[in-house]
Amino acid sequence: MTTFTFHTDPSHGWLEVRVTELLKANLAPSDFSAYSYQQGEVVYLEEDCDAPVFIRSYEAHVGPISVAEKYSHYSHWIRTLPRIECRTDDDFIF
């Protein structure tokens, strides 16, 4: 079972995932919303929309996960990172 870190502050949370783990789940950083962040080969997936997508896909392709929580009493440093470059409607052909 793989353990992922869930970072939280008083108002929000993000699941820390290495890009290599995204690929195992058949996903890429561009599959997520602009509410998630990326620093190099690590993404921080927003708790409401993006983290559940990753968890469902990872568990379907790889297996169960566990989560270790890290809480910050202050506004989290993750908020200062660049947002993920996500797909827009313009990226799709209809």
Image (cartoon, rainbow, N blue to C red):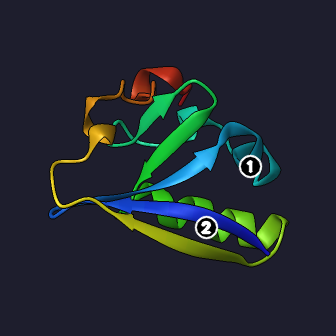
Q: Which residue is mark 2?
A: 55
Q: Which disc number belongs to residue 46?
A: none
Q: Which residue is drawn at the image coordinates 72% and 64% (left, top)?
A: 58
Q: Which residue is mark 1?
A: 21
Question: Which of these two is toward me, 21 or 88?
Answer: 21
**Furthest residue toward front:** 73
SS state under label 2: helix
Discs 1/2, front: 1
- Quarter location, residue 13: bottom left
Q: Is residue 76 above or below residue 7?
A: above
Count residues near mark 2 (Cα–Cα under 10 Å), then give few for <14, some for 14-19, many for 20+.
some
Q: Which residue is drawn at the image coordinates 58% and 36% (left, top)?
A: 42
Q: Is residue 87 above or below residue 46?
A: above
Q: Position of residue 78 (x, y in %)?
A: 33, 40
Mark 2 and mark 1 in contact (Cβ < 8 Å)? Answer: no
Q: Position of residue 34 (x, y in %)?
A: 35, 36
Left or right: 83 as drawn, with respect to 11: right
Q: Position of residue 51 (x, y in %)?
A: 48, 60
Left or right: 40 as drawn, with respect to 70: right
Count residues near mark 1 (Cα–Cα under 10 Å), then give few for <14, some for 14-19, many for 20+.
some
Question: Which of these two is toward me, 17 or 73?
Answer: 73
The alpha-carbon separation of the residues under discs 1 and 2 comes to 11 Å
Q: Is residue 77 above or below residue 60?
A: above
Q: Which residue is drawn at the image coordinates 74% and 72% (left, top)?
A: 59
Say whether residue 7 is visible: yes
| Amino acid type at image mark 1 | Glu
Say whether residue 87 is visible: no
Q: Position of residue 57 (x, y in %)?
A: 69, 64
SS state under label 1: helix
